Image (cartoon, grey):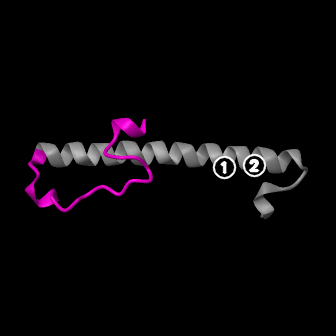
Amino acid sequence: MANETAGTPGETPDLSHLGCLTLEESLAAWERGEALAKHCQAKLDGARARLDAAIGAEGGDPESS
């Protein structure tokens, strides 16, 4: 998924040229950003689920931490 977006999560995109973008280019950049944010949120949600499952398997309460 990261290859389909403006960059990878560890890469900071160069936005210095944004003033030179056409409306279509700006919208495409926005859509790539939205896709990257959705991808990252899915990764975070998955990590949270794995942590909750691990804590639950140990008999702990994930809400109390």
The residue that mark 2 highlights is 52
* 34 on left or right of 49: left
Q: Where is residue 14 in the image (x, y as percent from the top left)?
A: 25, 58
For the N terminus, the quadrant is: top left
Residue depicted at x 91% and y 50%:
59
Q: Where is residue 54 in the image (x, y as percent from the top left)?
A: 80, 46
Q: Over which residues does the magenta segment extend? A: 1-23
Report how many numbered discs are placed on residues in the image.
Answer: 2
The single residue placed furthest to the right in the displayed view is: 59
* 26 on left or right of 1: left
Residue depicted at x 35% and y 35%:
4
Q: Is residue 11 magenta?
A: yes
For the C terminus, the quadrant is: bottom right
Q: Where is residue 28 in the image (x, y as percent from the top left)?
A: 22, 42
Q: Does the magenta stretch include residue 61?
A: no
* 52 on left or right of 4: right
Residue depicted at x 23% and y 59%:
15
Q: Which mark is residue 48?
A: 1
Question: Crowding near pointer 2: few (<14 within 10 Å), some, many (20+)?
Answer: some
Disc 2, SS: helix
